[in-house]
Amino acid sequence: MADLLNVVARMRALEQGQAVRIVSQRQVLIQPGAQILTMLSMAGEDTSVHAVAVGRLGVAPRIKVVADPRRRDDQYELLRWLLPHFETYYAQCRAEGTFPQIWVSSDGALGHLDTLADRLRFTDDQQVQRLGELWTYAGERSPIAGQQALISATSALTAHFATGQQETEDEHLGALLTWIEPPPGRDIFAAVAMAEQQPMGAKTDPRFDADELQPAVALFNKARKDNDVRAQDFHAGLIQQMMEGVIRPIYTATQKGMAILSDPRWQHNAALVSLGEQEASNFARFMEARDEGHRLPYHDSAKAAAFKIVARERTVDNVEAAFVRHDHAARERGAESGTVLRGTLVDRQKVRLAPRIFETRMVLSTAQDSLHLRAGDELWHLDDPKLCIRVTEVERRGPISWVSAIVDKGKRAALQLDIGNVLDLGPENPDWGATVREFAQMHTRLASAPWTHAEVVPPAMPSIRPRPNDLLAAVERLV
Amino acid sequence: MTPENARLHQLRGGLAPVEVGARGIESLARNADCTRLRAIVITGLTPSKVIEHVLGELPDAMSPFAMTLTQAFEKRLLSNAGGSLLTVYREKGHLDPQDAKITNVADLAPRDTQVDRIRRERETRRLIELKLRGDPAAPNLILKPRLTLTIVGVTHAIELDYLVASDREPFYRVGVIKSYADRVGKTNRAHIRTACREASVGTLALQQLLTSLGQPVELAGDRIDMVLKAPGSFTPRLYAAQRAESELASLTRALAAAPSDLDQIEQMLPAGASLAQPEVIEALPNHYCSTCKEHCALWQHCRAQAQAQGNAIILGDQAAEQLAAAGSLNRAMDLLNGSGRPPDNRAEVVLAAELRAASTLLDRIANG
Amino acid sequence: MTDPQTLADEALREILESQWQGVPAVVLRSPPGAGKTGVAQRLALQSARLLHQRCMVVTQTNEQAFDLARRLGRNADGFPIHFYARKDLDLPADVRTNGNIRVIEEFGHIPQQPGITIGNAAKWSWIDTGEAMFDLQVVDEAFQLPDYRFQLIANLAPRLVMIGDPGQIDPFVHCEIERWRCNPAGPQVSSPAALVKRHPGVMQMSLPVSRRLNTDTVRLVQPAFYPEMPFEAMSEDRELRFDVAGIVPFDAALDAVTAGAKIVMVELPPQLTGERDEEIADELVASIRRLLMRKAWVRDDGVVSRVSPEMIGVVCAHVSQVNAVRERLGRDLAGVFVETANRYQGIERAFMFVHHPLSGRADASAFHLDAGRLCVMLSRHRVACWIFGRQGIAQQLTRYAPIGDRALGIDDDPEYRGWRAHLTVMSWLANAGRLYPAVHGMIASAPGRAVG
């Protein structure tokens, strides 16, 4: 049914000719000084920056364009121009004990930034390398559940709205914004088709390249070859205008996306508080590691991969646990998908097992269709962190499931519940410290690298023990 | 003009044929249910050509910057008579020191004329036959080979980047050179898919050639080679002998699907009609899906048609699947809103109930 | 032709022998129901009793650990078996009260002398030392253990034997794995596959026989899911018969089993239904009732018994389908075990009823095409399996063949592999004449020919 929820939302959007809200609480933190970073690459040159616009919500962008980013010196000049901006911003975040946040227009733009970070941090130019390192924070955080460091406007908006088009079409920020705020009196499909004409990713339109940009760049290069400074300046100015014409709308659209999500209509989401704290803590560790000169490798050793995947897995669990507690939409979706047991308390008993030893038992009934519980499952009361139950039996009678459980923690709280109370039970409270503890344990376990994850296989070492003639029979006698 | 070519000419309504190549054929196979795409490609047109010459709109173009880079990357690899490509293979241990025989088919007949194209096809075939005979003179790298692939009785030329085989290998593998950035696990999956599928078209062409020569098709194998580009540089990254079993199976299956001959394509059109007429294109059954944008220039037209028809695919793959029991978006809306005729069967009853429950839930979620 | 028992014995001898040779690692691939846990048991006993080694056994879940502890706890000489468990673990009564099983909660209490210690992988990974404590590590159900979890316990012993079924559901990882997607030995890969990738020279073996599956089932399951791993059925002695004669065509699918067809498909009229299909649930449960109502007898490896609900299982892809069946079973059929494929791993029943994962769908997505899921569903039964689905699955597969989606440098395409397995299954069923129309709506008293 969770899938159908998304489908129905899109149907409603189509019916109304406007995107519909799918949540009531904000799903993403918007940092006060969050940076908007809009970059355009030259087609085919994935690690180029032809133009950049950088700024904040409510502030006009600072724009820099290079006439031809294929010239390394010019390209590096642009990147060096960007460095102080991010160095200052990161330093400020560090001093405030918070974290940097970068907004880009779309997942395509996010990928571009990530590609740049991966490439630039290995260059030989120290300043460009530093910029790559700083951006690597955002790039490496981006696949992590619940991260708040690098936000694509399209992803952030689609976490709040459903449109009446395909998910892949939501990747175009202009089309998405048109659905959210459609122009009055126009057919929505026509308005969206028009919006799609404007590039909103990290590349310029190929036809624009063919008809306008490439000829201008060619003329610039010719002027440079001819040492004609005036002509160079002229064509560079033309290119500047052209690129600004493309980049400004993307920057403005990204600002618009942020503004929509900053609107007070979105209720506070307590789940984001812990995510912000985690982000700050991650950022602090990242910067300390840079100060200490630790490298950021491109590939992971087996050991590093183990740490990273454990961190990611724990984060997924913690983010889900945080949202299911504090985010109304996540809680409801959880109840639909069966990850949250929404049961009515039909029985509660304190049973004496032995002198001074009691067990509190409860029975809940639910009509949930997607519940997938079994004996031994541990569930926590999502609204009372003290209460934890362990399922002993699940019985389905007709459309109703009867869940019997023993209260493991919070017996007193359990006994104060009234028959008929509806409880939401789900995963354990987020435990952000668990990753740290697990890492400490992993360090212990991985202090000596196993040969299985190293280069050399140890030689066979035959046993010197007397071998039975009939090995099979000898072993069967032991069974 | 052969009878077959005459029929194709008629179907194209006089439009000049386009060499659809591996790219065109693999895109056809991505959407095997799309008769429109199939008819266009088989008759020797491309969606871009239809956009431009039939619908009178500006076709998609490749950025000249991207084109320049792609050409430069390929040129660099194939420069020194292919020496750079050879080096890449040697460094990875896929060719031995003695595997140094390289032939560039394009050098023998470089012009884009019918005569030269035929010469390139013949030369490619000759070189392949050398290998089949076990002739030690058989090249290890054949650059710019030109093969043919017959689909539905129509022969299409397939010009590949290269074929590769060491002396100890019994036959060639197809190789593609792509200027896509190799970001390892983060490489754009659509790019990988495209490269594998284009190369697989070449493998199919090799298989057809083997069959025509009375040789087992298994010699062509199900592995292809791919050369990508390191991000931000021209450093090539070789992925040799990548398994392409699924791509080959997909292509084989799609190419065997209906319409299976020109007769069927002709029967789909009114008498005297051709694909040069916009209304004929519009009337051909299509199968718009979420991936059409990746490979077909007609995607916006097909999308508009799907929107007008109320096809659930306009809301995405998930919607198309979840609402399939209703048959159409309009019917799904009726079930959701409790309007229109009552549910026709148990599946619609269930769907209607689920849609309404989801709608109630959505209201609860979205409005706090 | 060598008989299956001899083949099985030879394979076991070879595995046991490898430990006398002191090979550093063995990857032992096992088809479903081959007796993996029995092999683990024998390896552990040989290690402790004959080789005088300290042997650790790793399981994936507590349930598997209990099962192994029970088996080892019954050993002939009363040799003590140690069970390494967390403090508050609720042990089953028979494990707790078995005098041969000693429960240990602290690693410092693990005996220094030759012995066997069982624990699950998670518990082993929290052991507070970086040093090797054992001579041999036996990992049961190894293909369910992702490499990053194995890495945390790999250095506890210099030699290891990894035993598992490569055809079942892959280990599940929730997070994004883009960093390691192109690494065939990445942290998310199953540990035996990663080990072989890093060290292709490690000894690899496979068990040649399934003790659970019958010959007819093997003829389908082996080519569909284990094309590179031939195996045979151990037993020919699996038979179903009814005291009450069947009514044609009403009982055709049930009676097909008595005639030797051990996997049969019941097809309902084609319809797009979405995940929950009420009519399939009706048909499936009606068939179970019919099986019991006709006073069925089963002979399973020489043991003859009346078919009871406890011998029957139902497996589905989705929880909603599981609930649809459970709702209809009633208290008299409470013994029928109904679960999703994920939770059926390691479990078997004499008779299985399967809700086909692709039934009623318009497309064929990666989840529903997953070969491991279908393999688990079709390999739980000892005697017979009835698959329920809507007509048109073969056509659906043809229409929705995957177009190819792989990671660079990785040969495997799980979606394609699953699609091919599904197609193999449907083709086999059709060619073997195993497709029967559903009889939903027909009543037992409808006029028809009695058989049997």
Image: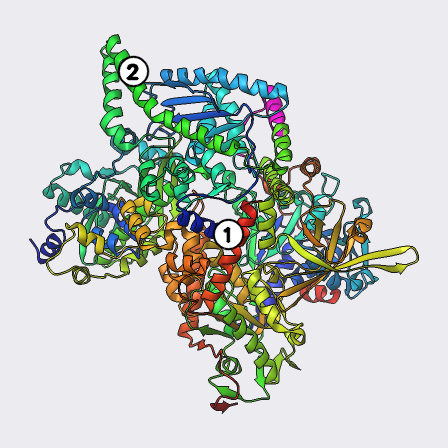
- What segment carries the magenta color? A282-300
B256 vs A318, left or right, is left
Is C30 one of the magenta-colored residues? no
Q: Locate residue B237, reporting x and y percent.
A: 39, 35
Residue A403, located in which quarter of the rendered image?
A: bottom right
Residue A236: assigned label: 2
Q: Position of residue A293 (x, y in %)?
A: 59, 20
* Image: C208 above or below C293: above
- For marks 1 and 2, the one nearer the N-term is 1
Q: Is residue C31 visible?
A: no
Chain letter for the residue marked with disc 2 in the picture: A
Q: Amino acid at mark 1?
A: Leu
**Mark 1 and mark 2 on one chain:** yes
In the foreground, C175 or B175: C175
Q: Chain of mark 1?
A: A
Residue A5 disc label: 1
Instruction: Determine contact: label 1, label 2, CB under 8 Å.
Output: no
In the image, residue A178 lies at what x, y percent?
Answer: 39, 38
Q: Give the Cα distance between marks 1 and 2.
A: 51 Å
Q: Is residue A168 visible?
A: yes
Helix, strand or loop at disc 1? helix
Outermost residue toward the front?
A185
Along the horizontal axis of the image, is A58 left or right of B261?
A: right
